[in-house]
Each structure stands twice: as C-alpha cells, then as structure tokens.
Image: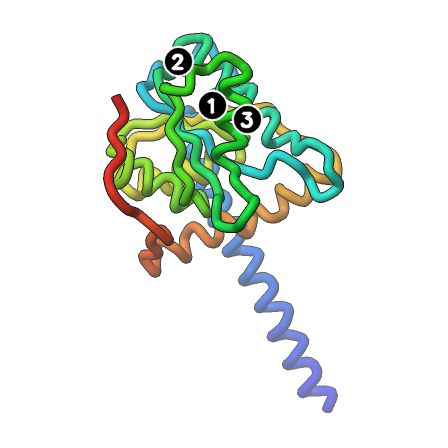
Amino acid sequence: MKKKSKKVLRFAVSLILAILIVVVLCNSLIYSNAKAKTYSNIDLVPKKKVGLLLGTNKFLKNGNINLYYKYRVEAAVNLFRKGKLKYIIVSGDNGAKGYDEPTQFKEDLIKRGVPANRIFLDYAGFRTLDSVVRAKEVFDQDDILIVSQKFHNERAIYLAEHKGLVAAGYNAKDVHGRLGMKVKIREYLARVKVFVDIVFRVKPKYLGEKIEIK
C-alpha cells in the first residue's frame, strides 16, 4: 500500500508540475507577443479607424458599478476625444433576456459625448475570440485598436493576430484589490484556453451578415 501511495503521490505532483508549466508557458507567450503593442499613454497611441471595445457587465452582483466597465468606457471616450479613433465597435454578450452589454456601453458612450453614428454594436461578442473574429469577418476590419485592461488586451491581440488582423491595445485603468485578484487568476486559465481554441480551431458562436463601417 505504501508503494502504491507513493506512486499516486508522485503522479499527482508530476501532474501539478506539468499543469503549472503549461500555464506559465501560455502566459509567457501571450505576454511576450504583446510587448510594444499595448499603450498606457494615450498620446503614443497610433490613430486607427476602428476601436474594438471589449464588453463586460456594468454592475457587480452586489449592485455596485463594475470598475472594469467604468474604466473601459473612460478609455474609449478619451480615445475618441483625442482623435485616435473614428469609430467604436462595442462587442459584448447579449445572450440572455435582460442582459445587454453592448447597449449599456453605447448609452454611456453617448452620454460622454461619442456620437451614436460612430458606435457599432456587436451583440454576439460572447468571448474575446468571438469579438476579434467578428471584427474581421462581420465588420470587415483588418487593423484594429483593442480597448480593455492590459492583461485582456494582451490576450485579445494574440487571438487577433492569429486570425489575421493587425492589432494594438489601449490599456484602460486596471482594477486592484479582491476583485482584481480574482480576475487575474481567471486570466491565467483563459490564456491556456487560447491555445486550446487555436489547436481545435474553435469558431465564434455566430457570424452573420456583413456590417459596413463608414
């Protein structure tokens, strides 16, 4: 029994180490690829025709404003005001009744001075993969500025480039504390999922007809 227990323990330790190596490798590849492709200083951001604003819920479960949402809105508004973008695609989840990320973003962008005719809504951005692929296949874009927090931009850029887009990212203000820690932990796993999706050639849930931006 002792020998069997030792074998099981060795296997468990080996498995955990293998998983950690995979997680670290995936994160390292995505981080390294995004170097010099994301910007925190708005004055250094290259001008682009279209920005891809990645969605999230406006409110947390406790009813408080989601700071990830708030800071992404602020980032997109500042880019538009500075003339860095002509149009904004808001890509988010609208898969359940009463849940509509793109419309929430649009309403707040308009309140902050972005004209409605400069905002295009992507209601099928269920995942980052869906958002970047639909930017190319549905909205016919091949060069985009992704707007989200830095860690999210890095992953989105990797996916976008794999799908044939030229992509850069503007880093919205990050969130710290307990919420920030939870999101960062999920991000490590999401980066592993990037490579799983690539290997298995996962496609967006929906595509649909072309939407012209002009």
Figure quadrant of the C terminus: top left
Name the residue located 55 percent from the left edge and 26 percent from the top edge. 72
Name the residue located 41 percent from the left edge and 44 percent from the top edge. 124
Mark sitting earlier along the chain (2/1):
2
Residue type at the position of mark 1: Tyr
Mark sitting earlier along the chain (3/2):
3
Name the residue located 53 percent from the left edge and 55 percent from the top edge. 21
Residue type at the position of mark 2: Lys
Q: Nearer the viewer, residue 172 or 139?
A: 139
From this viewpoint, is residue 210 visible?
Answer: yes
Figure quadrant of the N terminus: bottom right
Instruction: Give above or below for 199 relative to 109.
Output: below
Q: CB of mark 2 within 8 Å of CB of mark 1? A: yes
Instruction: Give above or below for 16 relative to 203.
Output: below
Q: Nearer the viewer, residue 119 or 197?
A: 119
The residue where tag 1 is placed is 170
The residue where tag 3 is placed is 72
Q: CB of mark 3 within 8 Å of CB of mark 2? A: no
- Coordinates of residue 60 in the picture (x, y in percent): 68, 39
- Coordinates of residue 33 in the picture (x, y in percent): 40, 36
- For disc 2, the neighbor class at 10 Å (few under 14, some 14 to 19, many from 20) is many
What is the number of the mark on residue 84?
2
Q: CA distance from mark 3 to mark 2?
A: 15 Å
- Coordinates of residue 88 in the picture (x, y in percent): 39, 24
